[in-house]
Image: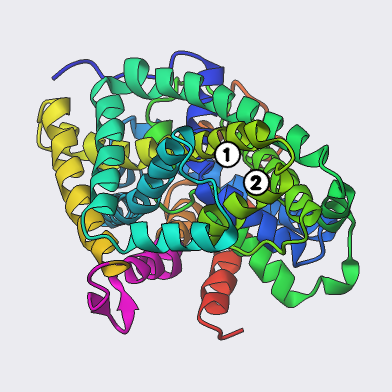
Amino acid sequence: MEKRGTFGSKIAIVLATAGSAVGLGNIWRFPFMTGHNGGAAFILVYFACVFLLGIPGMVSEFIVGRHSQTNAARAYGNIGGKRWRIIGYLGILTSTIILGFYAVVAGWCLQYLVASIMGRLNGDATYIIDCFKSFSSDPIRPCLWALGFILITHVVITKGVNQGIERASKLLMPLLLILLLILVVASCLLPGAIGGIKFLMMPDFSKVGKAVFLEALGQAFFSLSLGTACLCTYASYFKRDTNLLRSATQIAFLDSFIAILAGLMIFPAAFSVGIQPDSGPSLIFITLPNVFQQAFSAMPIAGYVIAILFYALLVFAALTSTISMHEIGTAFFHEELKLPRQRAAWIITTVCSLIAIFCSLSVGAYSELKVFGMSLMDFCDSLTAQIMLPVGAFLTSIMLGWFVSRQLVQEEFTNNGVLKATFFKAYLFSIRYIVPLCIVLIFLHQFGLI
């Protein structure tokens, strides 16, 4: 088996790992939650939650991955003992399911990018709604676009860590930032855009309460990809001298910065034409195309270009996430079954393709594909987000905080004493008490128990 790769530079570590965190949720969920939970006040609460939960959780998964420099299942077993391999297996299963249904929405984005380039999204609001309903309910086209997106991801993964993941991250993340900044400027220059900026950025502390804090906790948890084994897998490609705390802080900052920019892209344009943004797929496939049409009606060519840039942005954001999720399972089969990387990648590609097909059909042509009253796609989303991810992250913090020797954890945290242990006691206290408590609160809040 070929030599195991590592990321070639510190910037590659930040871009690749941040790319795994930055996804479609940053663009359709964070702005909506911010605008309806106190604007800048929510952002301040969110930053506090990133500090309390996000960064310690990321460092924990980094420690597990870099310590063993192997796939997630073996990494957890090496650092905690055989019984803790279950966390790695859970992460691999979780990421595979997520990739399956995530590829459906990513395929929609890819189709909309092509449709934008070909000028097919021009029309009034009714046309745009009918266009999305017609496409999403088709039994064939959404499946083909989802499979196409998985195959693009597959090609990157088969190139390996340096030539595939690292090279793609160095290309996609800067492009994503450039496109996002262009769209932010275009949105903020629209007439009446100041109302959207104020809506997003003016703090309204009257809305900040228990529910807002719990929403911010959940957003911090999901936005940073905690519990998927992605951070653990990517950390297994870190060099031994990587500063884990600094890397986690930089990644969390970049992820949050992109989410805030997404808000500055969406709200000014929406306010300019008097449309209240919603959340979820309807935002990016119905509401925003309508916003582009109205906001740039006086300059059709500008609306055409903006639509292309926006869907290119979505495709890049989705691809950085699908690459990381695919790599988790690929690394496992590559190393545990001693398979060539290409063959290991095909296993994940095949499994995820099957999940994608059935999930796509369940929200379209075959809506009777239900589990517990939900479409298969919604069920997979709920299963992973509400149960599997919190359980994986909770067990990781418990394992490192209480069952792995303090000396080993401190050695990894300080790079065997090379770095100062200034924040180690705070980190250890956090993963023993604060992180588990936060995850329990998120879990209970999701099920309406608090």
**Mark 2 in CB contact with mark 1 (< 8 angstroms):** yes
Task: Judge from the rendering whether residue 190 lies leftward or rightward of residue 240; answer left or right.
Answer: right
Disc assigned to residue 292 = 2
Closer-to-camera residue (439/375): 375
- Residue 259 is drawn in which quadrant? top right
Is residue 135 visible in the rendered structure shown here? yes
Q: Position of residue 249 (x, y in %)?
A: 65, 36
Of the two numbered discs 2 and 1 on the same chain, state the one appearing first in sequence.
2
**Residue type (three-letter) at the residue carrying disc 2:** Phe
Q: Is residue 376 magenta?
A: yes
Q: Nearer the viewer, residue 165 or 178?
A: 178
Q: Colour scheme used in the picture?
A: rainbow
- Give the percent coordinates (x, y) of residue 52: 68, 54
SS at mark 1?
helix
Residue 53 visible (yes or no): no
Which quadrant of the structure image shows residue 214?
bottom right
- Is residue 145 in the magenta section? no
In this picture, is 325 found above or below 179? below
The residue that label 1 is drawn on is 307
State the SS at label 2: helix
Q: Residue at x 49, y 56 (%)?
A: 397
Which residue occupies 55% across, 53% down? Answer: 284
All told, the count of numbered labels is 2
Residue at x 26%, y 78% (from the top left corner): 370
Quadrant into which the N terminus falls: top left
Left-right relation of 134 to 50: left
Residue at position x 36%, y 35% in the image: 323
C-alpha distance separating marks 2 and 1: 7 Å
Q: Position of residue 161 (x, y in %)?
A: 33, 22
Q: Which residues are magenta?
A: 365-391
